[in-house]
Structure formats: C-alpha cells, structure tokens
Amino acid sequence: VEKRNAADGLVYSVEKLLKEQGDQLPAAEREAVAQAVAAVKQALEGEDDAALDKTMETLQTQAHKLSEKIYQKAGEQEGQPDSASGPGKDEGGAVDADFEVVDEDKKKN
C-alpha cells in the first residue's frame, strides 16, 4: 500500500513539474518522461510489485534528469544580465569618489 501511495505521489509530482516547467524542455525529453509516467500508471493498475518498482525507478531517474535540466536553464537565465541593467545605466548605487573631510571649526579660524 505504501509503495503504491509513493508511486501515485511520484506520478503527481512529475506531472505537475511537466505542466509547470515542461515548456523549457525539448519535446523528446518531455515525451520520455510522459512515457515513464504512463508506465507507472499502468503498473499501478496491476498487481505486480516488481514491475511497479522497475517503472518507479525509471520515472525517478527521468524526473531527476528533468529537474536538473530545468534548474540548469534557470541558472543560465539568472546568469545573463538584463539589457536594461547592463553597463551605462545608472541605478543609483554606490559611486567611487575622492572626498575631503572639512572640519567647520578649523575652517572658521
């Protein structure tokens, strides 16, 4: 029962990930993951625990690869500077400058 619940949860998680982030992946990879999801669903309908274990392992491997690629793409996108915030745009940040401390009391004397 626990194994079936875990498989059901895995299917749900992967389907949700595909729905939310699938557009960031090539169609071939999305299809491979979708096939692994279908295999687990089919194994859930049967009574063969060995088949369920095998399909779950395959789906977990596919899901791991999927997550890796999504996070890798997200990291690449974060690493690229926006064109609006590139050099030449003053964002009001810190400015390097020379300054001289003037003591008002000494200045009056």
Image: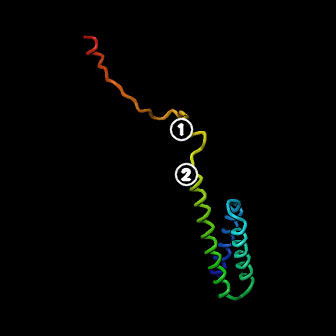
Residue at mark 2 to residue at mark 1: CA–CA distance: 15 Å
Q: Position of residue 48 (x, y in %)?
A: 69, 88
Circle 1: element type:
loop
Q: Horizontal placement of 107 versus 11: left or right?
A: left
Q: Amino acid at mark 1?
A: Pro
| Front-most of residues 82 and 108 | 82
Closest to the camera, between mark 2 and mark 1, is: 1
Task: Determine contact: label 2, label 1, CB under 8 Å.
Answer: no
- Which of the 4 image quadrants contains residue 31? bottom right
Q: Horizontal placement of 94 versus 57: left or right?
A: left
Which residue: 65% across, 73% down? 10
Which residue: 72% across, 83% down? 43
- When the figure is inspected, residue 70 is found, relative to residue 37, above or below; the finding is above
Residue 55 numbered mark, or none: none
- Which of the 4 image quadrants contains residue 68? bottom right
Q: Position of residue 59 (x, y in %)?
A: 65, 75
Which residue: 70% across, 62% down? 22
Circle 2: element type:
helix
| Front-most of residues 103 and 77 | 77
- Which coloring applies here? rainbow
- Residue wearing tag 2: 79
Q: Horizontal placement of 72 versus 16: left or right?
A: left
Q: Amino acid at mark 2?
A: Gly
- Residue wearing tag 1: 87
| Front-most of residues 105 and 46 | 105
- When the figure is inspected, residue 98 is found, relative to residue 1, above or below; the finding is above
- Residue neighbourhood size for the residue with mark 1, other residues' Cα within 10 Å, grouped as few (<14), some (14–19), many (≥20): few
- Which of the 4 image quadrants contains residue 72? bottom right
Which residue: 62% across, 79% down? 57
Q: For the N terminus, which image quadrant?
A: bottom right
